[in-house]
Amino acid sequence: MQKAPIKRNENIVKLSKDHHASLMFCWKLRQGIKHHVDEKRMIIYVKYFWDQHFSEHFREEEDILFAPLQDDLVNKAIADHRQVQTLIKTLSEPGAGDFYATLARLADVVDEHVRYEERVLFPHLEKELSQSKLEEIGKQLPGDPIKDNFEDAFWIKDKSL
């Protein structure tokens, strides 16, 4: 039996669309690991994605969406954000250990976090926050979801190799 798609409040649907880009980020990392892509190429992508997506997305969630309701579910999401940030920082440090294991951990943490927000936290917020508060939040969020325009398609296996 196929699950019905999650119906998201229109005022926060932009954040759910951002989550799709985050799941694609995880898939790309896993493909890069699978194809043993050079660490430098992968770290450039991770830094790009932090700068172009995660840093702003986390700020929007924490400063706009989560601010009205500080409870355990929100605090878990914030802790997840810090864990993602720490893993990205660890990848950037020379001699940080097993690069590909850390990269795989990053992909797993982001994947689990997105699914937590979509399946648990966002429905909780939609239930707890009034429609007028959700509309106020929606007005503060930029309209366009994040686009991943990274040019080096490292996740596509080069068939000539």
Image (cartoon, grey):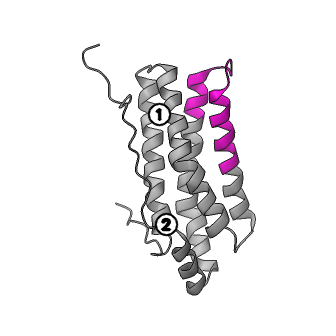
- Residue at 66% x, 50% y: name it: 81
Q: Which residue is mark 1?
A: 29
Q: Please state if 123 lies on the left or on the right of 144 as rendered.
A: right
Residue 71, image quadrant: bottom right
* Residue type beneath disc 2: Pro
Tell me the element at label 2: loop
Q: Which residue is mark 2?
A: 142
From the top left corner, tell me how far across and down residue 41 is, in percent.
Answer: 47, 25
Q: Is residue 68 above or below residue 161?
A: below
* Residue type beneath disc 1: Leu
Q: Please state if 30 lies on the left or on the right of 50 as rendered.
A: left
Tell me the element at label 1: helix
Marker disc for residue 130: none
What is the spatial separation of the Cα atoms under label 1 and label 2, in whole angstroms? 27 Å
Compare residues 16 and 128 and report the one nearer the observer. 16
Q: Quadrant of the C terminus?
A: top left
Q: Quadrant of the N terminus?
A: bottom left
From the top left corner, tell me how far across and down residue 123 is, in percent.
Answer: 56, 70
- Residue at 55% x, 36% y: name it: 47
The total number of labels drawn is 2
